[in-house]
Amino acid sequence: MKKWIVLSLSCLVMVLVAPVFAQITPTTQPATTTTTTTVQPVMAQPTDTTGRQRIAIFTPLYLDSAFDVAGNYRYDAKTFPRIASAGLEFWEGAELAIDSLRKEGIELDIHVYDTRAPQQQFDSLVASEEFKTTDLMIGQVKDATEAVKFATLAATLNIPFINASLPNDQGITNNPYYVILSPTLQTHCVGIYRFLQKNYSLQDIIVFRKKGDDRVKNYFTEFEKTTAVKLKIKYVTLEDNFTQDKLSIYLDDEKPNICVAGSIDPAFAQPLCQQLALLSKAGSPNVVIGMPTWDQVDFDKSQYKNLEIVYSTAFYIAPAGKQASTVYENFKTTFYSRPSDMVFRGYETLYHFAHLLKLYGHNLGSSLSDKKYMLFGGEFDIQPVINRATMTLDYFENKKLYFVKKLDGALKAVY
């Protein structure tokens, strides 16, 4: 097995056997980041009296699924539970941030909790007096239930909760402590419409829709009511298992066609792009603009040749950047693997907001627009989302989008 798996499993065993680590302050450094790692909500150590601010990181590690009550690994030595990968990678990124913060002399108490631990343990955790001293929560959120749970907890404790992964507001309102880092579909649709206005305002645009999925069309239509530049859009609904001839009747043979994939489903995007590629002419490719979920699609494959593919994303890591190159090299030499997007998210989220917490303390919520502590060449654009009906603040959302353009598997531009 890869060294990465071995090290990861060793780490998980340590966490399970000793769920609460003692506070450690090395004597060789006057200021360090102290981490208290726990997956159990039973807080055995005494309340900290050092005055260090406290950050709680929640991520799905599935430790109860991987280990039995005696700490024995449930699988064979060559098997790693893939279900735990994203949560573990997020924590690995957070550990890189902890190392960077320590080197900078930033003193914090940072705790990690397994969101897949039993509900009773979570309830005991949040009811404890020690947890009530938490200053900031960060979560790699998996579903709507978790988003609502942590947003509600944040409002109760009057501390920010940074949702680092789930791009959904879940109907949460009047909660100035809830921060969404991965922009919602509505934000992506507004950004795509503006991108089309900027680049293709005079051209005919075809939006191919998945049957029964009206979200993109509805968001486009809603935004059109507030903008002066209206696009020339034709909406086409495609049945399941559509074929090339169902697309060709809407395309112009004499020039490149500007198309939009009107669904976030990658299973809809892949055949659509493949068919549009076949209908492209050499040297004059069709253009298709897609969704943030296209990060999951491998567009290097030959079936996408001669198609210009553009999609929106909130997290773009410039691979040539110094900090990113260091992370890539570290994973290559230490784990014999390539870091995932979740590693970078965990790293950047903790590093950025830990600095803001240290700088602004309890005023962190009013200082979310500060962009000084970004690592990988991008930035957050965190803005308040105002409820039009009540004119109150519902939550905060990162509105920053990037547009990635690829052709024949090669990255051509990032807007």
Image (cartoon, rainbow, N blue to C red):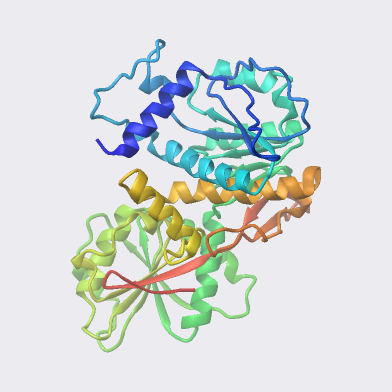
Going by the picture, which residue comes out furthest to the top?
70
* Above or below 42: residue 295: below
* Above or below 384: residue 407: below
Q: Report which quarter residue 22 is drawn in.
A: top right
Going by the picture, which residue comes out furthest to the right?
363
* Depth check, front residue: 80 or 95: 95
Residue at left 76%, top 54%?
367
Position of residue 84 measured from the top left corner of the image (x, y, whole percent): 39, 33
* Depth check, front residue: 327 or 83: 327
Is 341 positioned to the left or the right of 188 in the image?
Answer: left
* Above or below 296: residue 124: above
Residue at left 60%, top 40%?
138
Position of residue 286 measured from the top left corner of the image (x, y, whole percent): 30, 78
Position of residue 251 measured from the top left corner of the image (x, y, whole percent): 29, 79
- Where does the N terminus fall, quadrant-wise? top left
Residue at left 33%, top 19%?
73
Res. 167 visible in picture: no
* Above or below 332: residue 170: above
Going by the picture, which residue comes out furthest to the bottom?
254
Residue at left 67%, top 33%?
152
Position of residue 313 measured from the top left corner of the image (x, y, whole percent): 47, 61
Q: How many marks?
A: 0
